[in-house]
Amino acid sequence: SQQGEEDPQALSIQEGENATMNCSYKTSINNLQWYRQNSGRGLVHLILIRSNEREKHSGRLRVTLDTSKKSSSLLITASRAADTASYFCATDARGAQKLVFGQGTRLTINP
Amino acid sequence: GAVVSQHPSWVICKSGTSVKIECRSLDFQATTMFWYRQFPKQSLMLMATSNEGSKATYEQGVEKDKFLINHASLTLSTLTVTSAHPEDSSFYICSATDRFSGANVLTFGAGSRLTVL
């Protein structure tokens, strides 16, 4: 079954606005992570939230986790043109070594 | 922070030739490395998990004789696409975890774009 399905698939907003992306997953997890990918590049780790945490902040990023709904959200506040990228959630299923990535949200920040 | 070097960043080859992609952890020991394939505007598809000193574990549907993975040291894993064909053209990305890190956070290489003519 598909883990880590993001929505929306694509999001286009004006610079300065907030961007919210959502991720849903199906199985129990140890933690959930968000990664960013600039076009044609590798992924960069943004933030990790453990299964016993509900909210975490890092700079302009805010991540929430609702294990009862098996969902997470990533909020980027005061967006900048440089935030334009694809964002992926990844889940670390209990007992599994590998991460499973969602389909990603393509975020475009218009200047 | 942790850095993973992957190269070549792009390669063009003729059909039937083999191509090797290297993935190195520069400042940490990576007992486990992962190889992914990514099609345009799509997510990462895990191809195999590479553990140092042992055979790689391939995902279902990935041909192990086609995509040879070697992880001979704690800092180097290689992916060889054997007898490449145009349908193998893709973006290949490696990642690694720090053996001393408590969490399963991945450090990615910059990716290798393979074009098979």
Image (cartoon, coloured by chain):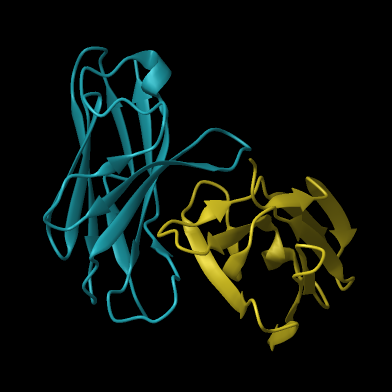
Chain colours: A yellow, B cyan
Q: Position of residue B25 (x, y in %)?
A: 24, 66
Could you say which quadrant of the image residue B53 lies in?
bottom left
Q: Position of residue A46 (x, y in %)?
A: 58, 73
Q: Position of residue A40 (x, y in %)?
A: 51, 46
- Near-viewer residue (A84 or B70): B70
Q: Residue at 75% across / 82% down in the picture?
A: A54
- Near-viewer residue (B40 or B66): B66
- Near-viewer residue (A96 or B5): A96
Q: Which quadrant does the C terminus of chain A fall into?
A: bottom right
Horizontally, is A76 left or right of B80 in the view? right
Q: Position of residue B48 (x, y in %)?
A: 34, 43
- Near-viewer residue (A90 or B18): A90
Q: Residue at 58% across / 61% down in the picture?
A: A91
Q: Residue at 80% across / 60% down in the picture?
A: A22
The mark tally for this picture is 0
Whether B90 is drawn above or below A32: the answer is above
Whether B16 is drawn above or below A90: the answer is above
Q: Which quadrant does the N terminus of chain A fall into?
A: top right
Could you say which quadrant of the image residue A74 lies in?
bottom right
Whether B115 is drawn above or below B69: the answer is above
Could you say which quadrant of the image residue B106 lies in?
bottom left
Horizontally, is B101 left or right of A17 in the view? left
Q: Residue at 17% across / 64% down in the picture?
A: B75
